[in-house]
Amino acid sequence: MATFEEGISDTLSLLRRKGPMTRAEIVAETGLSRSAVNLRIDALLTARLVIGSARETATKGRPAEVFSFNSGRGKLLAADVGATKFRAGLCDLGGEVESEIELPSDVAVGPEVLLGTIVDCFEKFLAETGTDAEEILGIGLSLPAPVRRGAGTTVNPPIMPLWNRFDVPAWFSRHFDCPVFLEKDANAMAYGAARFSHPTADDLLLVKIGTGIGSGLIHRGHLYRGADGAAGDLGHIPTTLPGEEEGPLCKCGNRGCLEARAGGWAILRDLQEAGEPVHAQDDLIAALAAGRPAAVQLARRAGQQIGTAIATAVNLLNPRIVVLAGHLVAAGGDHLVPAIRERVYSRSLPLATSDLTIVPSDLHPREGLVGLAHLVSDGLLEPAQIGRLVERDT
């Protein structure tokens, strides 16, 4: 038998999926008794998580009351942090982004400095929109780092060592009294792609190709994190080339990782070694956009190497769609994407690729922010959290 929180969450989830419904329609859809549905709807109305309205009819008589999810019940804050930039946003409870801003970031400086900048953005959103801090129901933060599942901490992040085991929810509790959800950046991006761009794809793999390389997996409609949160670390799959004993040194301390060959920082390194006047990721993006031969050649080579790794993932996971995201895809997709597709289709099993689609993201650069908004919204309305918003009738 469902608990009170499970019942409330299930009913609200039904309204979010199906749209406005009458009590009778909810009874027919769920098989619950009229009294059980009334109990749930009354609790959701009291909590202002649903609103009721009259349904227009063509016949005489009293119109039926329909109930719909109230996305204006509260606000969410989210920040998608990358190695060089972050995007912050103010969202409604349904995950719709209402205000957003992108600013430079430096994850190497440590958590307190960067999180302080993010809170400044959050407070600016509140001031500009007239939103009270009490209206904030949840906060989401994504980081380019391994995130321990359910713990709110990163674990030995290669490019941001000062963040190791830093308690992100505890830090935010100084400023906001609400749950905080910490997620790996590629997971948030995968969720955004699944919820916004490919809602019918139950099995989706998103590969982020930016300064680093990572991936997020949607399995049977849900984000798959693995036992501890380490699933999807595509960038640190070991690779070897013919005649090579050890590959290039990766930021994680190992040698021969895919990221150390094909990530944005590795391509920048190789361009510098070739004598090209590039110093930062923006220079690499400009070189790709301008079609400079050395940058194009390295991007194509990176695409082949990434494609080989994705082919392994396709054989193992059998996704329906692979979404390619990140600033290198946006800037150099004409060179990266064809190379990736060729490798995946030539090195994966026919059954795994017979209905496989490989596409660049159509959400750049908002995948992570959109995904976080929906992750926080969904998390707050799950049984484990919805009790904060709905009072049990005693």
Image: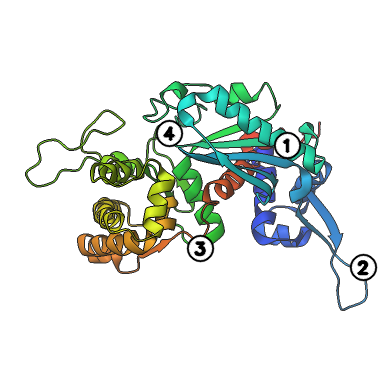
Classify residue 161 as left or right of residue 21.
left
Residue 225, compared with residue 60, is above or below; it is above
Where is residue 386 drawn, in percent x and y? 68, 37
In the image, 127 versus 33, the foreground residue is: 127
Q: Which of marks 4 and 1 is nearer the N terminus?
A: 1
Of discs 4 and 1, which sits in the foreground? 1
Q: How are the residues colored?
A: rainbow
Instruction: Name the residue carrying label 3.
Output: 200
Secondary element under disc 1, as helix, strand or loop, is helix
Residue 383 falls in which quadrant of the image? top right
Which circle marks residue 62 in the picture?
2
The crowding category of the residue bearing disc 3, from other C-alpha atoms within 10 Å (few below 14, some 14 to 19, many at least 20), is: few
Question: The C terminus appears in which quarter of the rendering?
Answer: top right
Instruction: Name the residue carrying label 4.
Output: 145
Q: Earlier in the sequence, mark 4 or mark 3?
A: 4
**Residue flagged by tag 3: what amino acid is it?**
Thr
